Image (cartoon, grey):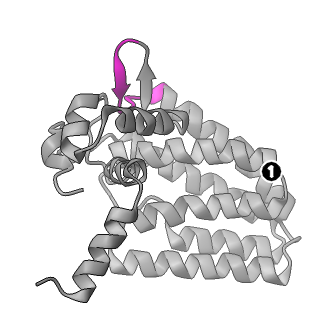
Amino acid sequence: MASRKDTSSNEAANATPPDERVYAAIASALLRGKLAPGAQLVERELAAAFDCTRGTIRKVLARLGAEGKLTLEANRGAFVPSPTPADIREVYRARQVVEAGIVATLCGALSAPDKRALRAHVKAEQRALKAGSVEECVRLAGRFHLLLAELAGAPEVLAFLAKLVAKTELYKALFDPTKLSNCSSDEHGRLVDALDDGDLAAALTAMRTHIDELEARVLAQASGARTNDLATLFAGA
């Protein structure tokens, strides 16, 4: 006889819409670097792996494609992105330009609540790193940069940066073997210190160096072993 706790867990799982369950599993696999660059995500294989309809799979793949996490090719299907070094450099260059503007806007202008929010976020990153949570480290690392954009009060810049961050998170998962080093909480802490002090030169240097190091790690292209066996990868998801 199942316990009340087991029954509640099963009910919660069953309450999750199929497309959200599939989306979460595929997005997680991408962020953990479990899928190789260029791997094709075949609808029928995914439908079998997740025990759902191909319509559900098609909806999820379209959503991931719109987010830039998958490449969708007409009459061919969905693929894990396989960016060239030039592609990677272009995206990181765009981040350098956009985030320099954000830093210049915020430097010396942070309110007390802004500072508390940034420092609380850095502490959350430190806890995730200590716990060894790869996905949480990646999520919080990207979220830090988006938080800066939010504090700058420029919604269109935030929307654009969100797309760039999504791409670089994926590049990190695909190519950077140092799984917990997407963004160093120490580097973020130094940037917050410079912004708090109103030291624009130090803040710009901290951001530029930080993004340069992220790019260098990705371009090393030293990736671990991944699988294209979708049934094995998503078993039990």
Residue at 69% in and 73% down: 192
Label 1, residues with CA under 10 Å away: few <14, some 14-19, many ≥20 = few
Residue 196 vertical position relative to residue 69 in the rendered view, above or below: below
Q: Left or right? Give the position of 28 relative to 46.
A: right
Q: Which residue is mark 1?
A: 155
The image quadrant that residue 107 belongs to is bottom right
- Of residues 188 and 150, which is closer to you in this image? 150
The image quadrant that residue 76 belongs to is top left
For numbered disc 1, what is the local secondary structure? helix
Residue stretch rendered in magenta on the structure? 75-86
Where residue 232 appears, as percent x and y from the top left, is 12, 47
Residue 126 visible somewhere in the drawing: yes
Residue 96 visible somewhere in the drawing: no
- Examine the structure image and report whether residue 113 is included in the region drawn in magenta: no
Amino acid at dot 1: Pro
Residue at 64% in and 44% down: 95
Q: Left or right? Give the position of 155 relative to 142.
A: right
